[in-house]
Image (cartoon, grey):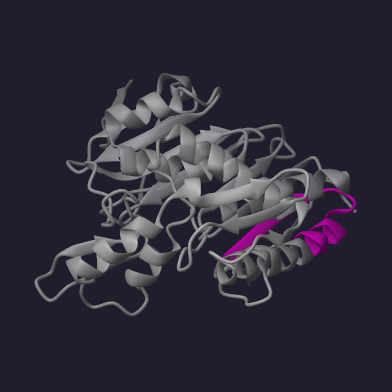
Amino acid sequence: MDNSAAVEATHTGMDTEMAHKAFGRHSVKALRAVENEAQRLECLLSRFLPESDISRINHSAGVKREKISPETYEILSRAMECSAISQGLFDITVGPLADLWDYKHALEPPANNKIELVLPLVSYKDLELDAVQKTAGLKNSGQSVDLGGIGKGFAGDRFMEIFQEYGVTSAFSNIGGNVSTLGNKPDGSPWRVGIRHPRLNGLIGAVAVTGKAVVTSGDYERYFLDKEGRRFHHILNPITGYPAESGLVSVTVVADSAMTADALSTVVFVAGLERGLALIEKYPRAEAVLVDAKLRVYVTRGLRKYFQASAEINVTYI
């Protein structure tokens, strides 16, 4: 096969649309392997599939630990690191809160007393991992793990590994807006990933990347309006129990790892501008594009050469 010819594939998985493009002799086989991997990971990591590792952990909460796959152990341990670094602004035991804020069906926010009832169940410190036995368990009945803020990133990293195993040197995957890239385009130019404007049709700009991941968290992705017209988005602050109100409406993180970018975009969105920037600095080679509630755009200095703003978008480099 001509190495410059693109092979493309789209499919659903992890409750979202996935699209891939790969170049190279074995790209057809690689794309098939990526699709199979997406199904395999969903069977391990989805809390909505009863036989998954995550469902078994949740079902056994307060009772016993469950034996888990190496992949599940890896994602849980990485999530625990992020939870500790962010002091709980990222918390994969947010499952009880996520169930309460049922975005697909909700017409109004849950009652305050219901939120207060489940808040004590949200604590990443109650997830016990055993590195030797490869087991995981939650201390208390009613607790549950939800990998919504990190699972797609983990999948993106795995897809890039699979492409490399098949000798593909130029590829990208878009997992519901989480973009992972491998190498450059075949012509040697970087991949250009557009960043959506959080309030208008169109883009605030695009970032040029080579072998990096670009992940955005925004209040416009999933939300509902109550009868008074108030917007409630899906990114919850695990400490308050309510959708995050940090003054940011969109956070895009560029990092070597899609899993890092996925978790960090969520954390920074919850943390707000100043605290979020301090968290980004804890991750070497991670950069960000942030949009606040007044639609001011801030870009970290490491992206100065790589971010191109759309017309009429003013950028402050920080």
> In the figure, 302 relative to 133: above or below?
above
> In the figure, 243 relative to 296: above or below?
below
> 33 or 93: nearer the eye?
93
In the rendered structure, the answer to whether residue 318 lies left or right of residue 159 reads left
Residue 39 in sight: yes
Residue 266 drawn at (x, y percent): 42, 46
Residue 205 in sight: no
Q: Which residue is drawn at 81% across and 64% down?
A: 32
> 95 or 102: nearer the eye?
95
Residue 238 drawn at (x, y percent): 35, 51
> In the figure, 38 relative to 71: above or below?
below
Q: Which residue is drawn at 80% across and 48% down?
A: 163
Q: Which residue is drawn at 78% across and 66% down?
A: 36
The C terminus is located in which quarter?
top left
Whether residue 209 is in magenta: the answer is: no
Residue 279 drawn at (x, y percent): 41, 28
Residue 52 drawn at (x, y percent): 67, 70
Residue reaching furthest left? 228
Q: What stretch is highlighted in magenta?
A: 17-34
Whether residue 33 is in magenta: the answer is: yes
In the rendered structure, the answer to whether residue 239 lies left or right of residue 185 reads left
Residue reaching furthest front? 63
> 25 or 311: nearer the eye?
25
The N terminus is located in which quarter?
bottom right
User: In the picture, residue 210 is in which quadrant?
Assistant: top right
